[in-house]
Image (tube, rainbow, N blue to C red):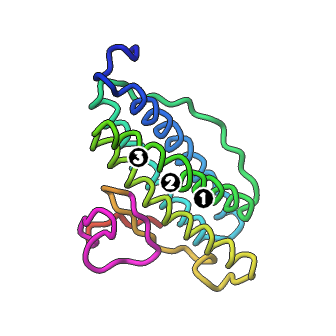
Amino acid sequence: MSATTYSFGSEVTIKNLLAAYQGEMNTQARYRSFAAQADAEGLFGVGSMFRAAARAEQIHANAQARAIRHLGGTATAVMEISRVGHTLDNLRKALDGENYEIAVVYPAFIEEASSRINAMAARSFQWALEAEKTHARLYAEAIRLIEGNQMRSWIGAVHDFYVCPVCAYTAREHMDGNCAVCNYPADRMELVR
């Protein structure tokens, strides 16, 4: 579909949605590979965390695909081969990626979609931004624990993580009440191990 067939004034928003969609699809695949590596190294809690983050990235991609279709586009992604290293290196790489999305990518995408009054796209970007912040905090904590050789902490055993099926907020512990980002009932969060 050419840009001229999109909704008037939405070309840049669709371009941003497509970039985000491709990024989220590739990231979820990479995180699944990182989870397998963490499990192989006996870092089962880190494996659980990467599986939860992969689920969150898939939720983001699904929301972005809906927004793309809403604007008249087609969601497509070129899948890249994931390079997998040792878990500590994978965590650092993941943290760098999340921090870049938090500082640069999603703020710019939110600003552009908001300026076009495209609520669906802006909301998908805002929710992704908030979830990426939870991932960055989890990755930073896991890095500190590995560097401190604290294998008896949550990183060394299979651990339950909770992912909001609406906005993809990711938590290490079950929440009371509702999701901190989208207000979805916390008792209906997806459990990922």
x then y, percent, for residue 77: 50, 31
Element type at marker 1? helix
Q: Is residue 153 above or below residue 140?
A: below
Residue that carries the numbered disc 2 in the rendered image: 54
- Give the amino acid at mark 3: Ile
Of badges 2 and 3, nearer the viewer stands: 3
User: What's the CA distance linking mark 2 and mark 3?
Assistant: 22 Å
Quadrant location of residue 189?
bottom left
Of residues 44 and 30, the one drawn nearer to the viewer in this rendering: 30
What is the number of the mark on residue 35? 1
Amino acid beneath label 1: Ala
Residue 34 lies, in percent from the top left, at: 64, 55
Residue 20 location in percent, x, y?
48, 40
Residue drawn 36% across and 36% down? 65
Residue 182 painted magenta: yes
The residue tagged 3 is 110
Q: Is residue 134 left or right of residue 91?
A: left
Q: Which residues are magenta?
A: 168-186
- In the rendered image, residue 54, in percent from the top left (x then y), is placed at 50, 54
> Which of the marked residues, 3 or 1, is nearer the chain's N terminus?
1
Q: CA distance from mark 1 to mark 2?
A: 9 Å
- Mark 1 or mark 2, whichever is nearer to me: 2
In front here: 138 or 10? 10
- Residue type, mark 2 in image: Ala
Magenta part, dominant SS: loop
**Residue at the location (66% across, 43% down)?**
82
Q: Quadrant of residue 72?
A: top left
Do the numbered discs 1 and 2 sit on residues whose CB atoms are within 8 Å? yes
Q: Secondary structure at mark 2?
A: helix
Of helix, strand and loop, which one carries label 3? helix
